[in-house]
């Protein structure tokens, strides 16, 4: 997909898409950490809760270091403003039943006002019987300023967001259950 700017996003998408085949998404247990080795420190896994929350189940070491916090158990949506939360929740719910992937461009900021643009890719994973209720994601900085890792990144603001349909159109989860 040419819309992705960062090589890590492209690699993770290609890997996910190969595993997916004709299905809505691959199953969670099909993801092999060794197959995404270089990306692993920047990846995360989210869980979809019926409450509308999307807590982190796992977060890579480099991702945690850049934000100077442990993400596990925290809601992915908590780092965004109210308008972004609505957009992100809607996108995550859509790909959980229709199989697209979310590509985000976001600005992150430090407490001292330094800014960094990141690309975020979110890919659905099948874990339960009803919908894709896990998401594999990666956060990739588009530049590497010298201060990165010294000051914690904090607030995030959407610049652009889109759903990419790997098959050119949304899928129906029910039609895919026979392939799982």
Image: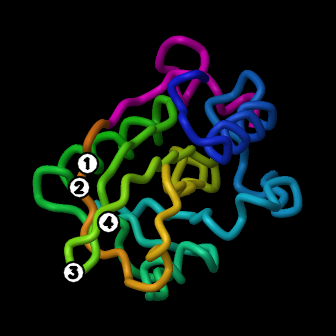
Q: Are marks 2 and 4 in contact (CB under 8 Å)?
A: no
Please state the horizontal and vertical placement of residue 110, each as a whole percent of the image: 28, 76
Gap in Å between the C-alphas at discs 3 and 1? 19 Å
**Disc marking residue 158:** 1
Q: Can residue 73 be seen in this snapshot?
A: yes
Sequence order check, earlier mark of 2 and 3: 3
Q: Which quadrant, please, contains the N terminus?
A: top right
Sequence order check, earlier mark of 3 and 1: 3
Looking at the image, which is closer to me, 104 or 17?
104
> Which of the two discs, 2 and 4, sits closer to the camera?
2
| Residue sitting at the far front | 146
Question: Which SS class for mark 3?
Answer: loop
Q: Can residue 51 be seen in this snapshot?
A: no
| Residue sitting at the far left | 82
Tell whether position 142 is magenta: no
Question: Which SS class for mark 1?
Answer: strand
Sequence order check, earlier mark of 3 and 4: 4
Gap in Å between the C-alphas at discs 3 and 4? 29 Å
Please state the horizontal and vertical placement of residue 88, each as a whole percent of the image: 29, 48
> What residue span does the magenta drawing correspond to?
161-180
Name which residue lies at 45% across and 38% down.
103
Vertical placement of residue 77 versus 111, above or below? above
Density class for disc 4 (Cα within 10 Å; few <14, some 14-19, many ≥20) is: some
Density class for disc 1 (Cα within 10 Å; few <14, some 14-19, many ≥20) is: some
Residue marked by disc 3:
112
Name which residue lies at 44% across and 88% down.
69
Please state the horizontal and vertical placement of residue 147, each as a whole percent of the image: 44, 76
| Residue sitting at the far top | 168
**Disc marking residue 53:** 4
């Amino acid at each position: 997909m040419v819309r992705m700017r960062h090589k890590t996003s492209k690699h993770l998408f290609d890997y996910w898409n190969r595993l997916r085949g004709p299905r809505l998404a691959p199953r969670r247990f099909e993801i092999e950490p060794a197959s995404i080795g270089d990306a692993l420190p920047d990846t995360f896994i989210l869980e979809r809760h019926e409450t509308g929350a999307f807590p982190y189940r796992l977060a890579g070491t480099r991702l945690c270091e850049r934000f100077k916090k442990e993400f596990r158990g925290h809601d992915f949506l908590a780092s965004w403003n109210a308008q972004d939360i609505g957009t992100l929740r809607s996108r995550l719910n859509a790909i959980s039943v229709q199989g697209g992937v979310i590509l985000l461009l976001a600005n992150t900021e430090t407490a001292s006002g330094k800014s960094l643009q990141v690309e975020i890719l979110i890919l659905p994973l099948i874990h339960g019987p009803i919908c894709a209720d896990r998401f594999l994601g990666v956060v990739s900085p588009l530049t590497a300023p010298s201060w990165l890792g010294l000051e914690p990144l904090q607030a995030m603001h959407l610049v652009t967001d889109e759903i990419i349909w790997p098959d050119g159109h949304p899928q129906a989860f029910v039609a895919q259950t026979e392939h799982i």
